[in-house]
Image: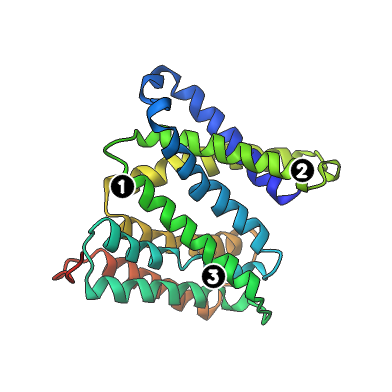
Amino acid sequence: MPPLLFAGIRSFIAGILLFLFAWKLRHAIRLKEHWKFYVISAILNNILYLGLQTVGMVYLPGGLFSVLVYIQPVILGILSWWLLNENMTIAKIIGLVLGFTGIVLVSIDGLMIHLSAIGVILALATALAWASGVVFVKKLKARVDFYWMVVMQLILGGGTLLVSGYFFEDVQSIIWNMDLISTILWGGTAGMAAGQVIYFKLMNEGEASKVGSYTFLVPIISVVVSAIFLDEVITKNLLFGMLLVGASIYLVNSKEKRIAGK
């Protein structure tokens, strides 16, 4: 399945499932009042995040693109300090830098020396859209029900990606088999529906920069799972990277005298 269609169908299915679960609480949607917020959230957290990611991986190797995208917790920490007035400490700054360094180490074995200016720009834009979307949702937590924000961004964003894929990709190239169907079902339920609700719930409950630091664990878990189920080798870089990510999470969540913000 072409990438835009694949991203769109997972998001759209997730949104529809969550919509059905929350139908009894439909009074909280307040569509006439909040539709602009839903559209902006869909653009940042779905259309731009998944869309830029999909296009960007055409220009860069997957490993290098992923490393650049995972500068997101660093950008999120800066935006949270600037726009949400969250605490910023020297330890947190060091922790975010260490976390990103750990991601580079974990991924370095799979990187290829192939730089594309367009690819780098798209990867950084993906990270910026992701971080901006999180801050946007958190800033509105007192005004808009977070659950419906997630539902609407998945439906609107997924629908837009599906329509874009229909016009710009080859629908006839889709090969329907059990591998594709099971991947769509898993991605639409656990990956998008459950994952998005849990992620944004945590973001709204705690400091975005602190919760965001745990995002550094995603590539770590990915490599470890690959080693267990795909017999991939656990390298020294992975071990050092894991230590740096662990130190990063500890430092970001530690208490220290804050740096004066806005």
Amino acid type indicated by mark 1: Lys
Secondary structure under tag 2 reads helix
**What residue does disc 2 label?**
167
Q: Amino acid at mark 3?
A: Val
* Alpha carbons under labels 1 and 2: distance apart: 35 Å
Residue lying farthest left? 257
Up the image or down, 251 lies above or below 237; here it is above
Task: Look at label 2 and name its amino acid.
Answer: Phe
The residue indicated by pointer 3 is: 67
Q: Nearer the viewer, mark 3 or mark 2?
A: 2
Residue on which the image places disc 1: 139
Say left or right for 259 vs 83: left
Relative side of 188 to 137, left or right = right
Residue 216: % across, % down: 43, 64
Residue at image position (60%, 33%) is 13
SS label for mark 3: helix
Residue ID at (65%, 38%): 9
Residue 129 at least partly seen: yes
Q: Nearer the viewer, mark 3 or mark 1?
A: 1
**Side of 172 where 76 appears, left or right:** left
Quarter of the figure with residue 262: bottom left
